[in-house]
Amino acid sequence: MSPPTAAPAALNAAPGAAPTGLSGYQKLIVALVAFLQFTIILDFMVLSPLGAVIIPALQITPSQFGLLVSAYAFSAGLSGLLAAGFTDRFDRKRVLLFFYTGFVLGTLLCALASSYHFLLFARVITGLFGGVIGSTVLAITTDLFEYRLRGRVMGVVQTAFAASNVLGLPLALLLSNRWGWNAPFLLIVGASLVVGVIIVLKMQPVRAHLQRRPDRNALHHFLHTVSTPRYLQGFATTGLLTVGGFMLMPFMSNFTVHNMGVPIEHLPLVYMVTGICSMIAGPLIGRASDAIGKFAVFACGCALTILMVTIYTHLGITPLFVVILVSVALFIGVSSRMISSSALISAVPNPADRGSYMAISSSIQQFAGGIAASIAGLIVTQRADGTIQHFEVLGYLLTVTTLTSLAMMYLIQRHLEPRTILPLAVAAPPPPVAP
């Protein structure tokens, strides 16, 4: 696939101009990467709700189960750093298929595990391969879609998180109740195989970045990426955004049940309604970021997040419908930040550095999330009756990180060079060769 010799007039449209519609091939690519992200996120999230089944089945302690959960995150973070020097040297489709194959094999090992140590090994393998897939997907979408269309693309791709909550987790729990805790992993393997086959058959090679002559020395390429000033600014902003969110999320279910008085049997309803609303809002947020500006949507998302976090963390006994309304508004604010920031930061790296940049950024998110959850665990306490104390402190910290990230994001969008917002290649199949 060759880059166009001249940028079409539409690519130079002024900010705020109405984006044109996506082609059939572009829609296929968006659907593929969104469903691929769905399988990755579901694999990462499915282990936690299975704890009540896995702990007695494998006869392990809660601390050992915690290691099972964190093993994926830390191995994913490590793999992103190790792969950063290599990913820009190959066709991105091949990179995606290589790591996705490893991810599927790792998930299959999870399904076949019958002991704690084997499952721990399987989670490490899954994380090592799965940790690079998210960054590769971002690099592909950045290469194939113009900057002015990336908001709507990210809006669809980010709905994978909500879909995993609404569709994936309930189905996984149903399968585990019927056939055992291994069954959800077999479900993920089956869905992943379907996605993999479609990628092999339908996705065109993504190698236009190779014509930019990427650095062939892996170590030099890695050091270049981690020492470029504007890249460091992007890494810091991404890490800060992750820290704020991961401080709050691990304790939200406990706070909802014990502090707000929501019966635990109603908790799935809260998540289901919140997830459905997030799935609907995601594409709309993406379109808005393309139409009115990515930073403008990011700023609105930050404002809504701060407002709703302040309200949420100070709630006491609350009617169920109010809890749902607050949760929906909070997650829409968070989604607005995620979608717009992903689209905006995609313009930071040069085309030849995108794979490396996205891999390092993904690793930073993994490590930042683990550190944030650990810090939050040192701040909050739980009384004998189950109520969470000092939860509002996490809200204050999230407010600080959100305001700081807003200022940093303003500097990023202000200093983006015009050449960084042009597409590397248009997401369309290569033209047919004349006979």
Image (cartoon, helix red, strand yellow):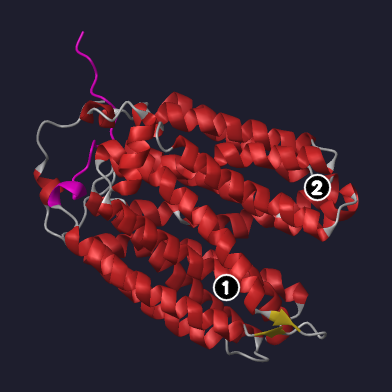
Residue 337 image offset from top left, x and y in percent? 39, 67
- Identified at 44% across, 79% down, the residue is 399
Q: Main secondary structure of the magenta part?
A: loop
Quadrant in which the N terminus appears: top left
- Lower position in the chain sequence, tag 2 or tag 1: 2
Q: Which mark is residue 187?
A: none
State which region is magenta.
418-435
Q: Residues within 10 Å of mark 1 (few under 14, many from 20)?
A: many
> Does the stretch in magenta take in 427?
yes
- Residue 129 screen position, x and y as percent: 56, 36
**Which of these two is toward me, 196 or 303?**
303
Image quarter of residue 33? top left
Residue extending furthest toward the top = 435
- Which percent across, then down, holds residue 42? 62, 50
Tell me what residue is drawn at x 34 percent, y 62 percent: 340
Say which residue label 1 marks.
248
Could you tell me which secondary element the residue under label 2 belongs to?
loop
Indicate the amino acid at tag 1: Leu
Amino acid type of the residue that numbered disc 2 sits on in the rendered structure: Trp
Q: Which residue is mark 2?
A: 181
Neighbours of disc 2 within 10 Å: few (<14), some (14-19), many (20+): many
Q: Quadrant of the C terminus?
A: top left
Look at 56% across and 44% down and name the residue there.
Answer: 76
**Foreground residue among 146 and 126:** 126
Of circles 2 and 1, which is in front? 1
In x, y percent, where is residue 65? Answer: 78, 54
398, above or below 38, in the image: below
Q: Is residue 170 visible?
A: yes
Is 435 in front, or is 408? 408
Name the residue: 90% across, 54% down. 56
Q: Say if 312 sits above or below 14 in the image.
A: below
